[in-house]
Image (tube, coloured by chain):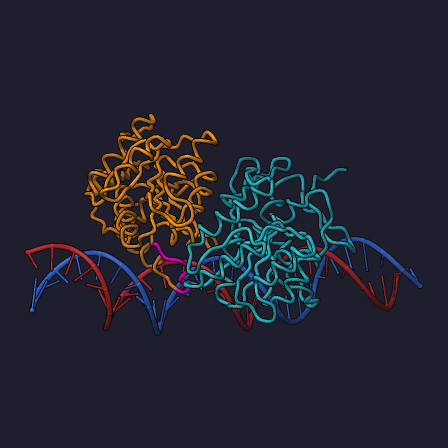
Chain colours: A orange, B cyan, C blue, D red
Amino acid sequence: MKLLIVEDEPNLLSVLRKGFTENNFEVSVCLDGETALEMIQNNDFDVVILDVMLPKVNGIEICRRLRAIKNFVPILLLTALGTSENIVNGLENGADDYLVKPFKFTELNARVMALARRANLDTQKPDIIKLEDLEINGKTKLVHRNGKPILLTHKEFRLLYYLAKNKGTIVSRNQILDNVWDISFDMNTNVVDVYINYLRKKIDKPYNTKMIQTIKGFGYILQTENE
Amino acid sequence: MKLLIVEDEPNLLSVLRKGFTENNFEVSVCLDGETALEMIQNNDFDVVILDVMLPKVNGIEICRRLRAIKNFVPILLLTALGTSENIVNGLENGADDYLVKPFKFTELNARVMALARRANLDTQKPDIIKLEDLEINGKTKLVHRNGKPILLTHKEFRLLYYLAKNKGTIVSRNQILDNVWDISFDMNTNVVDVYINYLRKKIDKPYNTKMIQTIKGFGYILQTENE
DNA sequence: GGATTTCTTAAGGTTTTTTTTAGAAAGTTT
DNA sequence: AAACTTTCTAAAAAAAACCTTAAGAAATCC
């Protein structure tokens, strides 16, 4: 599920990102209203979380403009306490829900899920990826191969999950760095190699068919050996 | 899609080039503002990525001068953190978008695509080239002939992809060197010949119709044998 | 606050890819 | 047909990409 978070307070933003990433959302973020508008129009987000107070174009204005051009992406507004006129205003301008700061993450999460549900998104597909005898459960974060449980660390899991999401296509180290590590261009690291090695030890070494393949010069691919 | 990257920091430049090349852009690069201006006027780039801090002529000045002579090539500015006055300045001088360093590659990529889309470029054709029973997928980097997968190395793939992009026209060794190797005019190498040979072994040798043809005195062409 | 786990970096070793070299083959010109 | 140019091929040399390990840093757990 693709989620956009528009929030200019860096601490809150980073907490939100982390939280939703943990729940297997594909999270994009941005810090101001103008960029938000553009991103929303150029992408297919399932839900947008919008702070009301934003630089350049505020959250309510974003709602208004989007609805004016018939964009009905589900929007949840975040408002500060004691600004109840904002809430009415926001809902009148096309927001679907709101939440008053400060809030608990689980509450926000629940509301986002509710919005997605309302938009008829398939929110409860099991989120299990199967590939041969390998099974990855995005919900419980458990991995099994051949019925046997495999314990992965957090990073290992995210890497495997990303590879699995893209099963059958080659993913480059850059793509992996972007999506699994939230690194911006550390141009000199081999973390990916190292983690691929960790993963291999756990999910490939003990078995005959190796699922993680190196495509030299391009990156890695998760697939069955022959093909 | 033709892209110009103007950046004086060699590491960043090389990562950017690699990243965009990976995504099948035709990438040109340059390291200073003066050369950039010249290149932009003499070529038809679809998008220009411009660092603000540049030797000789800075990025914002480049924008200004280009717009002054009615050149409206889409420009994306790269600015360092904490220089927000630069951003306003840049946008006022005709830049179309900006990105603050450090950034994730995917984000830059998304914005470049957005710019291209805005300029009405066809950004979402599937990027699969078919020629008889030969199929080249620029996205997955996989090549099939007659349904069978063929494993190519990175350079082999790029060479084949370039030939395929120009299917039906002769490409000279120099053109190939320019576009596949990033060499301009090293007239003392026969890498191209050697790689053509490698390619032939993989995609032609095992089949009856040979697709890579030599045109003596000119270069090579990818096409069906007869005709 | 100490112990444990996880993450990151760096270095050495291995494999694969890329480039160069040089001689053979094929085609052109005189 | 001999001399010359261009192209092809194989193999050696060089470079790059990748793997593995180990050790220190950071985060987490108890």
- Predominant SS along the magenta part: loop
Residue at the image point whose x is 60% and y is 58% from the top: B63
Residue at the image point whose x is 55% and y is 55% from the top: B92
Residue at the image point whose x is 42% and y is 54% from the top: B104
Q: Quadrant of residue B191?
A: bottom right
Q: Quadrant of residue D18?
A: bottom left
Tell me: residue A136, above or below residue A192.
above
Q: Quadrant of residue B105?
A: bottom left
Q: Is residue B139 left or right of residue A190?
A: right
Q: Is residue B25 left or right of residue A62?
A: right
User: Could you say which is closer to the camera, residue B28 or residue B177?
Assistant: B28
Residue occupying the far front of the picture? A85
Relative image position of residue A74 (x, y in whole percent): 35, 32
Q: Is residue B209 left or right of residue A111?
A: right
Relative image position of residue B18 (x, y in whole percent): 51, 57
Q: Is residue A52 left or right of residue B81?
A: left
* In magenta segment, residue A183: yes
Quarter of the image that includes the C terminus of chain A: top left
User: Could you say which is closer to the camera, residue A205 or residue A141?
Assistant: A141
Q: Which residues are magenta?
A: A182-188
Quarter of the image that includes the N terminus of chain A: top left
Residue at the image point whose x is 31% and y is 46% from the top: A160
